[in-house]
Image (spheres, rainbow, N blue to C red):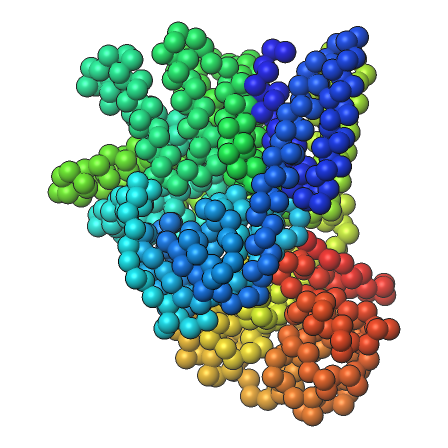
């Protein structure tokens, strides 16, 4: 084995991913399967790679066994679901705001009379501040909820990677107390983070400070949602997630500092190692940062002992250490993307650079100018190609704008990172000098946000790729490369497999585009306690309703379909939350017509959005709007909303609507959408019933001979595809 640590580490990570996919209940079967394979390949000595496969199977067996043990040790948290428990614990992360609520990560020290996993955490959501800073004790009665469990990268798995096992909501926020404050090394580091955050805020504007905190500390809570979305659309969101790129720059900065101070080589390496650990601590020891930090420490150790460290072996060892400490780290998408990108850089970057070096323009000046461009292009392509099998199934989008965006933004971002670190240091020791250092930092922030804004608005910036299509393409690509491995030696087979994969990918995009032409797609979304409907047809869109905790599901659905503007935005309810959600949607997506009630304009966000909309219609009892040459009609009568599309009649029954006010001719509906389930709806006779609740809540009143689809955030989106003269397709999009 040329790279034993790489083989063991990658096998370990892959086995954990498989275990997460199949769940704790199937781990015994997986362990038996990998153990049998290990035994077979251990004793089969005639096979050329038998020992390598045996080592991989042994690593997989250990990984699945440890995952089984870890998941069994925390399985008792399911007993807390939907129970009110007296919680006592310590705030162990920086508090932040999300969806009009204050969020606190609390390490539980006592949970009533129940045994809570040691070191386990809960995520508390409160409408009012209940703590001031990390280290504060929180005591009070909480309603506990188990996170959603819908597969490999569900909320339950990703939160478990951070030791968070439950959501918590105070029963009475006025009764929640903060009896004391705890001090520890970790709390001191968090307090240092708060101090540094304040230092950044003191010398930069709010917009620039949010970007600097994201790039320097990986803290995205202070970053504008608009800026974050622009970076994501432009394909450079990795610049906002502290990972190997940021770690390499900080290592370079530490190295330059110790060399300038003329430290001996060994002492300088030790100082850089301490700086790496401190930077990992300030960023919260996130899996992606820890991966890159461990790799850098291994490289430093190799330098100290006069041995050159192999990149893939170092990567495998880092993955092995992280996943051994916490098997749920395999559910961290950031870690998986970081590992994939690093593997791509190690395996492909050099070859791409060599291929690009064949194109040499005349003149030394052009060669010097193009040399860094070729390096950036090679690194961007290699990272993109290796992360593509993860990005497509998980996010469903591909960003062609990523190549020019990386060329324009990577180097300025590296300069910004170094200048920001110097600025923060000066803010601590010499505040007046920090104000001078903040000037170029502010210029670079404006440059980066400007580039992201321009590139994200380009027509080719991002393409949607549905989950089913992405999985099918990925399976075909893996099959092609598997066949290439089996048919013999030689590089042409891999080139052929790669070319065929690209052709399949382009054909998939073309087929997906053709399949939705002249087809009206109604995506029915849930955001906790409300229903939203996103209607799209031939690149145009309308949104009906935007209730719930957040506008994110609606914006995500629009982004997945490459929608940048709305022909129509309709408010269904009158709540403050819906007004705020509609306001945020109208701010981010150019809106031609906005329909709302007059009292909704009391919401400041909603009022600002109405001023930006092309037309604002304030309705009384009802309205009727025709869209896209009559292909779709949206009507309102009292509390009820109806959508007419082809032969389908979709009736939206909002929460609190009285059945007595429903017009007689509206009772003939094909699809019934309801936020709540009153007993008075039984006289309706829909083909489908789609409800914003779980199956158990519906089954006791819904007639068994009718089809119903419970609609909750963990169940995904229900999508209707309505074609002219064709049967309507009803499908679940996860």
| 267 or 110, nearer to the observer | 110
Q: Residue at x 57, y 65 (%)?
A: 82
Q: Say left or right for 439 vs 231.
A: left
| 703 or 68, nearer to the observer | 68
| 16 or 358, nearer to the observer | 16
x and y, in percent, of residue 107 in the image: 42, 51
Q: Say left or right for 96 vs 620.
A: left
Furthest-front residue in view? 113
Total tally of numbered discs in the picture: 0
x and y, in percent, of residue 352 in the image: 56, 19
For the N terminus, the quadrant is top right
Residue 559 seen in the figure = no
x and y, in percent, of residue 44 in the image: 79, 12
Furthest-bottom residue in view? 660
x and y, in percent, of residue 594 in the image: 53, 73
Q: Residue at x 67, y 91 (%)?
A: 661
Q: Residue at x 48, y 35 (%)?
A: 288
The quadrant where residue 629 appears: bottom right
User: In the rendered image of this protein, does residue 189 appear above or below residue 2?
Assistant: below
Residue 483 seen in the figure = yes
| 128 or 122, nearer to the observer | 122
Q: Residue at x 85, y 63 (%)?
A: 726
User: In the rendered image of this protein, does residue 272 appear above or below residue 363?
Assistant: below
Q: Say left or right for 398 vs 274.
A: right
């Amino acid at each position: 084995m040329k790279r034993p640590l790489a083989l063991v580490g990658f096998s370990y990570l892959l086995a954990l991913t498989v275990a997460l996919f199949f769940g704790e209940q199937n781990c015994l079967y997986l362990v038996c399967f990998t153990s049998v394979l290990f035994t077979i390949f251990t004793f089969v000595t005639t096979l050329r790679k038998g020992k390598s496969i045996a080592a991989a199977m042994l690593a997989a067996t250990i990984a699945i066994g440890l995952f089984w043990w870890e998941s069994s040790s925390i399985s008792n948290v399911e007993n807390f679901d939907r129970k009110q428990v007296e919680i006592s614990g310590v705030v162990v992360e920086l508090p932040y705001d999300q969806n009009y609520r204050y969020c606190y990560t609390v390490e539980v020290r006592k949970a009533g009379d129940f045994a809570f996993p040691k070191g386990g955490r809960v995520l508390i959501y409160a409408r009012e501040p209940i703590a001031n800073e990390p280290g504060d004790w929180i005591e009070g009665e909480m309603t506990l909820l188990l996170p959603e469990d819908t597969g490999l990268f569900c909320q339950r798995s990703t939160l478990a990677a951070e030791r968070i096992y439950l959501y918590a909501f105070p029963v009475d926020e006025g009764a929640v107390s903060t009896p004391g404050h705890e001090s520890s090394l970790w709390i001191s580091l968090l307090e240092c983070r708060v101090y540094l955050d304040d230092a950044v805020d003191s010398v930069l504007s709010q917009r620039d400070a949010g970007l600097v905190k994201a790039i320097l500390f990986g803290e995205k809570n202070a970053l504008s949602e608009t800026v974050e979305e622009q970076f994501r659309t432009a394909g450079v969101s990795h610049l906002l997630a502290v990972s190997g790129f940021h770690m390499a720059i900080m290592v370079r900065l530490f190295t330059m500092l110790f060399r300038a101070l003329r430290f001996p080589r060994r002492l300088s390496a030790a100082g850089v190692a301490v700086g790496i650990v401190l930077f990992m601590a300030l960023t919260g020891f996130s899996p992606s940062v820890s991966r890159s930090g461990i790799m850098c420490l291994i490289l430093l150790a190799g330098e100290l002992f006069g041995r050159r460290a192999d990149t893939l072996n170092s990567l495998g060892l880092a993955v092995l250490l992280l996943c051994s400490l916490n098997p749920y780290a395999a559910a961290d998408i950031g870690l998986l993307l970081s590992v994939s990108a690093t593997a791509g850089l190690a395996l492909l970057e050099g070859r791409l650079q060599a291929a690009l070096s064949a194109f040499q323009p005349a003149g030394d000046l052009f060669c010097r100018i193009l040399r860094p461009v070729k390096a950036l292009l090679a690194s961007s392509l290699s990272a993109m190609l290796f992360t593509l099998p993860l990005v497509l199934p998980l996010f469903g989008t591909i960003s062609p704008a990523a190549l020019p965006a990386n060329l324009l933004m990577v180097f300025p971002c590296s300069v910004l990172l170094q200048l920001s670190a110097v600025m923060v240091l000066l803010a601590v020791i010499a505040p007046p000098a920090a104000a001078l250092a903040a000037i170029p930092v502010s210029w670079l922030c404006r440059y980066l946000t400007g580039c992201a804004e321009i590139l994200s608005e380009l027509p080719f910036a991002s393409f949607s790729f549905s989950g089913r299509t992405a999985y099918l393409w990925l399976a075909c690509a893996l099959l092609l490369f598997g066949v290439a491995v089996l048919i013999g030696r030689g590089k042409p087979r891999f080139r052929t497999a790669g070319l065929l994969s690209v052709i399949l990918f382009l054909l998939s995009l073309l087929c997906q585009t053709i399949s939705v032409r002249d087809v009206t797609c109604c995506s029915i979304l849930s955001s906790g306690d409300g229903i939203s409907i996103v209607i799209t047809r031939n690149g145009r869109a309308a949104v009906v309703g935007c209730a719930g905790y957040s506008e994110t599901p609606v914006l995500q659905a629009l982004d997945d379909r490459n929608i940048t503007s709305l022909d129509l935005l309709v408010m269904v309810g009158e709540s403050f939350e819906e007004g705020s959600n509609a306001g945020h949607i109208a701010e981010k997506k150019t809106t031609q017509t906005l329909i709302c009630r007059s009292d909704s304009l009391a919401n400041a966000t909603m009022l600002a959005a109405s001023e930006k909309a092309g037309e604002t219609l304030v309705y009384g009892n009802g309205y009727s709007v025709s869209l896209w040459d009559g292909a779709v009609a949206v009507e309102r009568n009292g509390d009820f909303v109806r959508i007419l599309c082809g032969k389908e009649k979709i009736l939206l029954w909002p929460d609190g609507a009285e059945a007595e006010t429903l017009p007689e001719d509206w009772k003939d509906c094909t699809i019934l959408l309801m936020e709540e389930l009153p007993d008075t709806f039984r006289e309706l006779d829909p083909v489908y019933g789609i409800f914003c609740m779980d199956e158990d809540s519906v089954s006791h009143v819904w007639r068994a001979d009718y089809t119903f689809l419970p609609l909750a955030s963990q169940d995904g989106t229900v999508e209707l595809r309505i074609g002219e003269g064709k049967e309507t397709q009803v499908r679940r999009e996860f």
